[in-house]
Amino acid sequence: MSMPKHDLSSRHFQRKISQFCELRIAPITSKRVLENIRPFLMSLIIYRRSPPLRSGQLDWTAIGQACDVEAELTAGLKKQLQPGLDAIIRWLDGPPAVEEQRPPNPTASPDKMVPTKKAASAPSTRKPRRATADGIVAPSDTAPRGPAPKPISPFPEPLFDATEDPVSFQDALVYHMRRFGETYWQLYRAVVHLNETFDNKTLLSWIQGERVPRSVASFNILRRIERRYRLAEGYFKEKLPHQARSLYGHDLGDIGPAERRRISLHLPEDFNSLPFTKREETLDWVRRVIISGSTEYRRYQAAASKQRYAIRFPGVTYGSSFLSSRSLAAAAGTTQNVAEELDDPDLLSGVVDAPPRLAMEMADLIRFKTSALTAIGFQRNGVWGEETASQKIEHLGLMFGALAASPNGVVKGFGVPLSRLSFGLLVFPGVWDWYLQWREQRRGFYTKWEEDMLMVAQALSRADVGWIRQHPELLRNVRPIAGLIEQEEIDFAARDWHGACDAFHRHAANRSKEIQRVVRVHRDPFEPIMCVLEADSPLAEYRKITDEIVRRMPDEARYPRPAAEAVRSFLLLRLGLHLGLRQKNLRQLRVCPRGHYPTSERRLEDLKCGELRWSDRDQGWRSLSRRSHSKTPVHPSSDRNRFG
């Protein structure tokens, strides 16, 4: 076994490897494994031995046995340990330091010294090395082969002034490297620190246009290059083909991959350099505000959405004049059996279809409020549009669902059997009082929603024009329900239907006034945009969003889908700002492709929507509104030139 070589060069490299172990190995493994790996690496340096190899690759089985860490040698530990082993292999392949060269062995036999003497007697052009006073051989005066390495300067001087500003990231990086006369290897040695594992091939792939920076470490290297070349901060980042792409490589601990993808989009670039407490605070804020919801209303909505209890009316839609007898007969054969099975409220869970009788009553109400002409003998005050009708169906379905839900479940309904549900229940004050109090207990206070429901109740029971008022036969389906409706109330309504409707109308009006005094706003829709509304020019603030979309537009050749999504976002914002349409009207806006015949105004009136169409005369897009029939240009020439 060869003797240990405690020289200056090896001791210096041992210190580097020891620091490497503290930085890369200690954080991910136990102290025992660290104390086994560190001496193994030191012995490779001291005795100048290469790590175990097999077919030119590291033999991890032999390494684990040598360190006695076979069980702890995971894939993550191998990944962190490999740079240190590669560094040792590179150090061993280099020429030995001058201090490490030993004089010839004086105890060698004369026979072995003969070739040496012969070789020494031969003429040689090499100059003899001189030893110093302490016996160390001085370095040879012979110059090493190849050009001398270029010294590393933190701020090199450019060879020429910057007269160009390339558009792409690859061209900009190559241009500035040429301006400072540096190769990719020289730049790599200048910006990458010794204890970092950033691969030089990554920098080469940027120059060749094969890859672009995406990790936190890559963006740190970009910032160092910008400082080295004295460029503006963010110069290279602004030239990346996909500005809106999130970074990876944040130090997020044991957070899973799926949550990492959602969180990393909202983390700052210097997240890894922040103190631990600041990182924890940032993660908590992103999870609470962006991922899971921040406001009280969003938390309530998330919890309430998991509790399904509504009654669904699948056969009732806007514009349908009636439910066919065939569909009702089919429903009677299937849904009625389901209703009988679900008479036990403990079995009622989730959203169920309405029983046939209740579905017929809802269909008659929708026909009454949406048809062009009322049936003979009936009167009404106002009609419902498509959106209003859909909303009323949903709200009344929630009310009937709450009445039918089990009182022992999470919804804590009243437990009315499905077979007893009827619109005739809505003329009794006890039913509405229970429903209002039930909603108040779920949410914690009264809102505008309860007031709107009472307005619907007043409209249905209003004299002469109320739908329930004009259908006294609804009372035939009402049965006493303990705690809601007494038999005396049913008898009074049977004797004087209009009197019962008048009494309920007054009760609903009084309840509406009482709720108005205590109503609270659970969700202010203007709160998220108050900073915009309070600005001197709200439209200018929104225009900043469109400008940022254009500035961060992905390269359509490399990222076609994200580029299309960005263009869609830009057009939606610009059209909304320019036309001033509501969300519904903007969503229903039609588009006539260039070169096609536009839709007639009468057809648009029937469809109740507007249309975007190309104007050959103005050489631009125009919007035709169905209400005013006005033709409005939708974008200026600058945007038209940019997006066609």
Image: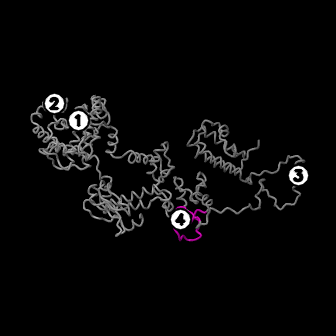
Badge 4 vs badge 2, beta-carbon distance below 8 Å? no
For marks 4 and 2, give the CA distance. 86 Å
**Closer to viewer: mark 1 or mark 4:** 1
Kindly state the secondary structure of the residue where label 4 is placed: loop
For marks 4 and 3, give the CA distance. 60 Å
For marks 1 and 3, give the CA distance. 116 Å
Question: How far from the left and from the top, in percent, is residue 367?
Answer: 21, 45
For marks 3 and 2, give the CA distance. 125 Å
Q: In the figure, residue 204 lies in which quadrant?
A: bottom right
Please state which amino acid type lies under the numbered disc 2.
Glu
Question: How far from the left and from the top, in percent, is residue 407?
Answer: 27, 31
Please state which amino acid type lies under the numbered disc 4.
Arg
Question: How far from the left and from the top, in percent, is residue 479?
Answer: 18, 30
Q: Main secondary structure of the magenta part?
A: loop
Residue corresponding to mark 3: 115
Judging depth in this view, the residue of 74 and 465 nearest the camera is 465
Residues packed near mark 2 inside 10 Å, few (<14), some (14 to 19) or many (20 plus): some
Q: In the figure, residue 346 lies in which quadrant?
A: top left
* Mark 1 / mark 3, whichever is N-terminal: 3
Kindly state the secondary structure of the residue where label 3 is placed: helix
Residue corresponding to mark 1: 357
Residue corresponding to mark 2: 486
Residue corresponding to mark 4: 230
Q: Which residues are magenta?
A: 153-177
Question: How far from the left and from the top, in percent, is residue 605?
Answer: 26, 57
Please state which amino acid type lies under the numbered disc 3.
Pro
**Closer to viewer: mark 4 or mark 2:** 2
**Closer to viewer: mark 2 or mark 1:** 1
Q: Is residue 330 above or below residue 56?
A: above
Judging depth in this view, the residue of 494 and 253 nearest the camera is 494
Q: Quadrant of the N terminus?
A: top right
